[in-house]
Amino acid sequence: MKQTIARSLIVVMAVFIIIAGKFAYIQLFQADRLQKETVEQRVRKIKEMPERGEIKDNEGRVLAMSLNAKNIAVYPNLMKSKETREKVAKVLSDVLELPYKDVLKKVGTRDSKGKLVQWTSIANRVSPEKGEKLKDSDYAGYIEISNAPKRYYPNGSLASTILGFVNYENQPGAGIEMSLNHYLSGIPGYTVAEVDHSKKEIPIGFQTASKPVPGQQITLTIDSYIQYTLEETLKKAAKDMKPKAMHAVVMDPNTGKILGMASYPSFDPNDYTSAKPGSINLNPASYVYEPGSTFKPEYMAAALDGGYINENSSWYDGVGSVNIGGARIKNFDGVGLGQMSLQDIIVNSSNVGMVRISQSMTSKQTLEGLKKMGFGQKTGIEFPNEEIGLVPTVKRLNGDPQAKATVSFGQGISVTPVQLITAFSEVINGGYNITPTILEKVEDEYGNVQYQWAPGKKERAHKEKTVQLMKKYLAANYEIGSGKTIKIDGYDGGAKTGSAWKVENGRYKSGAIIGSFMGFIPRDNPKYVMLAVVDEPEGIGFGAQSGGPIFHNAMTEILRYKGEPKTKPLKGKDKIEENIKINVPDLKYELFDVAEEKLKKAVKGSVVVAKKGLGEVVISQDYNYKDGTLYVNLKTVNIKGTGATYIPKIEGLPVNQVKSLLSRYNIKLQSHSKGNIVYQETEPGEYSKKIKKLTVWCN
């Protein structure tokens, strides 16, 4: 009996020691791991993305906005059975309209050790309605539903080279979306919650949350219609000249505010992955080129400011060329001007005359003048990829008399369009320093202004006498020189053309030029200055024929749109016809009734709208103004025509109205709520493929 009891005690003691040892082992060696696993199973942390701030133009028109969307993910390690994973995959597949096999594979994702992973993404930027369905499902505890605002650009490619884009991970990739991201991005929020065995949040369990802080709203200095005018002008010019690239900038020369800034080619930030190589980062602040003769006014102004030349300076040019260091530098036409004044040099764009001016300055004086005007340094405009150009050193100019000579007429020096138009503006705005800007103001979500542009201290960049002389010379060029074929009837102003041989791989490319035109209107108190640059226009050798028409066509429309009064009589007329302010919006792919209504709201004055064709969708427009009335012709086609489907712009329209219209053409409209449409997945345009369904979001 005693032996039996002893044996039992030994067994009990052994079991106790084993159990105690196991507990000790767990406490000493496995506590951290087990605690971590417990936290992983009972605590969830969800990152809530903030809504990105809107970007607007100077009239309050929205250029970039965020749409409410959801990201969907799952917690595979919480699904302990195959049956659970299959049911979760089925729910996700049905609600998100995704292939069941693909979803099941993601739900069962394992790591390198064969364990189910803690988290894996299923779908991004789905509609809020789908997110609600998943939230109400029986398996919501295994599914993460987080805010994922979707960046949307309602005007497509308009101002894309200014705006840039935001990628699918809500990260900016270019433009002011990148450079002003600290304003726009907002602050993410987090939710950390304790869940029960069925993976539902425990109402009285541990829970904490920090709400996301929305990004701030940005107002730009650009005007959408001026921007549209520039971009349309470049597109039309591209058909005629087939250039490699083009740039156009319109600035208020008195403030430095950019009113419009366009580049060609551009891209659609809603579909940035389809952009042409190089187009995303192409803008007038990053494009570097040799300016040619548009550099002459700035160089001459520097020489006048320094007192190296004056209004009475003149030189004799008998043969149209000059020998510098054994090389012969010629005028563009090889013709001598005889005795030439400063005005003659500008009006005839004389290279020989500019070389003579350069000989009146030392290399150091030359570089000091260029630096004072901002060349070789950043202007401060709000772009992430602004270039500084290339300015030769004093040592280089001292050792190379040809380089010193050619810089005077814009060869052997590289600038950006933003640098050049800023320096030009300082010559004609009265002679005052400006800093180019595209940012008007920043507001928080409550409308409180966090930043407001304000003019800086007025400091002189040029002497008053220099300004008077340069405006006189540029006005003469506009009237009787290279700008005379480009001038706009009814308006006086000043201008300079430029044609520079293009540099490629360190050498001038035979037969290739960069043509440009820079001008201002009106002459006495300039309100608008514009620079147009054309990179390798096909079959065109001069700036007057390449950049000139772009300036003329765009500026004519801008002056009409802004209702600027004429400064002198039109040709052949004794009276100046009063301008009315007409804002003709882009109506392509609008429904005709909507287009007609938009016209009547936009136009301040009498307007007559004529419909060409029997369709619903506008595909082109033209107009003319006569005797105080605007006549607009809108060409229309059916939504489904022969071999093509024309998807109209339907944002802002009642969903039921659009659904009824599309049903006539057997196109199903899938909406995620009722009300007015705020976003359409299929972009407006012409499609050769059959369109059977359109998906939209409503407010």
Image (spheres, grey):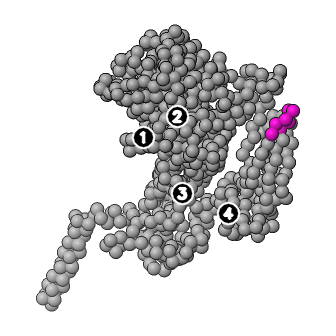
The residue carrying mark 4 is 687
Q: State the residue position of label 3.
A: 274
Q: Which residue is drawn at 42% across and 72% down?
A: 109
In front: mark 1 or mark 4?
Answer: 1
Say whether marks 2 and 3 touch (CB < 8 Å).
no
What's the mark number on residue 508?
Answer: 1
How far apart in space, not on screen, are marks 1 and 4 (Cα)? 43 Å
Identify the residue under disc 2. 499
Stretch in magenta: 624-630
Q: Where is residue 158 in the image (x, y as percent from the top left)?
A: 62, 45
Helix, strand or loop at mark 2 = strand
Which kind of residue does numbered mark 2 sit on?
A: Ser
Label 3, secondary structure: give it. helix
Give the distance between the C-alpha atoms of the residues marked 3 and 4, in whole angstroms. Answer: 16 Å
* For marks 1 and 4 on the same chain, the one whose residue lies earlier in the sequence: 1
Q: Distance between the residues labelled 2 and 3?
A: 33 Å
